[in-house]
């Protein structure tokens, strides 16, 4: 499907295609948002990070200061799930690094990765710092729908040619992707922290 903001078309991929992109990647950035919290997907993400690390992938997690419904919410959820503190980075720590990631996996985030904030001076989000995932090689967005986030602003990221949407519940999608990563890599041990 061609990307066309005016007509609302975007590239949609399924879990096996998304898993394939992760398997091929050397560097992966995961950007969690409120959708991860709502779906209670923090343990699924922790398992996926562990699996990718065990197979030689460098995986970092970028947390926006206002991700979720309160500052620090996602940091707490990731810590609760056992994601090591040293892989969880604040947005500023990764500034200027986005083009070094083969894949950015956005899970339930919307406004915090919206290019309008930096590219459209008339946007309601104009001037808000965002995680510029669109600069990475491939972007995979896991989200229930193409609808707006908390600010209810359309997100042109969803229509970028390097963005693939995987629509569905974050926990279900990540669990499914994890299964396909294992399938593609063959039997592997999941590294424990």
Image (cartoon, grey):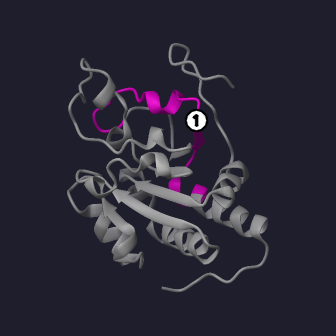
Residue identified by numbered label 1: 162
Bounds of the magenta segment? 149-173
**From what the image shows, is residue 180 above or below residue 116?**
below
Left or right: residue 17 compared with residue 173: right
**From what the image shows, is residue 102 above or below residue 44?**
above
Left or right: residue 82 compared with residue 21: left
Q: Residue at x 30, y 38 (%)?
A: 150
Q: Secondary structure at mark 1?
A: loop
Q: Nearer the viewer, residue 79 or 90?
A: 90
Query: How many labels sit on residues?
Result: 1
Q: Nearer the viewer, residue 33 or 92?
A: 92
Structural crowding at the residue carrying mark 1, measured as other residues with C-alpha within 10 Å and reported as few (<14), some (14–19) or many (≥20): some
Farthest top residue?
Answer: 6
State the image coordinates of residue 83 (x, y, percent, origin top left): 42, 75
State the image coordinates of residue 122 (x, y, percent, origin top left): 24, 17
State the image coordinates of residue 55 (x, y, percent, origin top left): 65, 74
Left or right: residue 33 compared with residue 66: right
Q: Residue at x 50, y 65 (%)?
A: 59
């Amino acid at each position: 499907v061609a990307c066309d903001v005016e007509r609302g078309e975007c590239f949609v991929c399924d879990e096996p295609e998304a898993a394939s992109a992760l398997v091929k990647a050397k560097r992966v950035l995961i950007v969690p948002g409120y959708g991860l919290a709502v779906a209670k997907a923090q343990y699924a993400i922790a398992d996926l990070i562990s699996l990718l690390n065990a197979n030689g992938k460098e995986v970092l997690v970028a947390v926006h200061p206002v991700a979720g419904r309160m500052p620090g919410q996602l940091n707490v959820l990731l810590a609760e799930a056992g994601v090591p503190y040293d892989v969880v980075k604040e947005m500023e720590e990764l500034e200027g690094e986005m083009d070094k990631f083969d894949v950015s996996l956005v899970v339930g985030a919307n406004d915090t990765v919206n290019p309008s904030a930096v590219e459209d001076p008339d946007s309601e989000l104009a001037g808000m710092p965002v995680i510029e995932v669109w600069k990475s090689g491939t972007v995979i967005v896991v989200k229930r729908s193409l609808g707006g986030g908390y600010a209810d602003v359309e997100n042109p990221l969803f229509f970028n040619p390097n963005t693939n949407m995987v629509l569905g519940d974050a926990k279900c999608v990540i669990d499914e992707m994890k299964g396909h990563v294992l399938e593609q890599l063959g039997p592997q041990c999941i590294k424990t922290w």
